[in-house]
Amino acid sequence: MFEVRRLDNNEDLDFLTDMLYESIFISENKPSKQKLLQSKHLRKYHQDWGRAGDTALIAYDLHQQPAGAVWYRLFSDMLPL
């Protein structure tokens, strides 16, 4: 059984960026999490997380360990890509 909660603290944000990194398939020589997620074309998906239009849910197992995540970020003309 899992409990699902909204992302609400920096520890969960670290888990969310771990999940974003793991969701990117690179078959060989995948860069480090830091290098890959700070690349210009990927920063827009997580930088300044928590702004209007950002939503993330974290699933926790019976031991309250994060087990998975879903998230989205809405973009607008006011918040550039």
Image (cartoon, grey):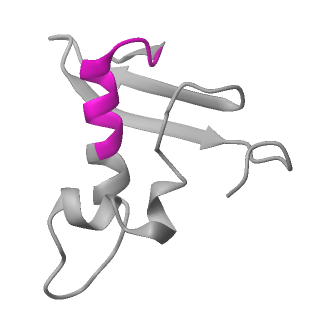
The x and y percentages for residue 79 are: 74, 44
Q: What residue is drawn where x is 28% and y is 81%? A: 26
Depth check, front residue: 18 or 61 = 18
The x and y percentages for residue 38 are: 33, 60
Q: What residue is drawn where x is 45% and y is 56%? A: 43
Q: Is residue 18 left or right of residue 9?
A: left
Quadrant in the picture for the N terminus: top left
Quadrant in the picture for the C terminus: bottom right
Q: Quadrant of residue 74?
A: top right
Q: Main secondary structure of the magenta part?
A: helix
Task: Please say if 25 is above or below 22.
Answer: below
Q: What residue is drawn where x is 14% and y is 11%? A: 63
Q: What residue is drawn where x is 50% and y is 32%? A: 49
Residue occupying the far right of the picture:
77
Q: Quadrant of residue 39?
A: bottom left
- Residue 11 lies in the magenta-colored region: yes
Magenta highlight range: 6-17
Task: Please say if 63 is above or below 78.
Answer: above
- Residue 80 lies in the magenta-colored region: no
Q: Is residue 28 left or right of residue 71?
A: left
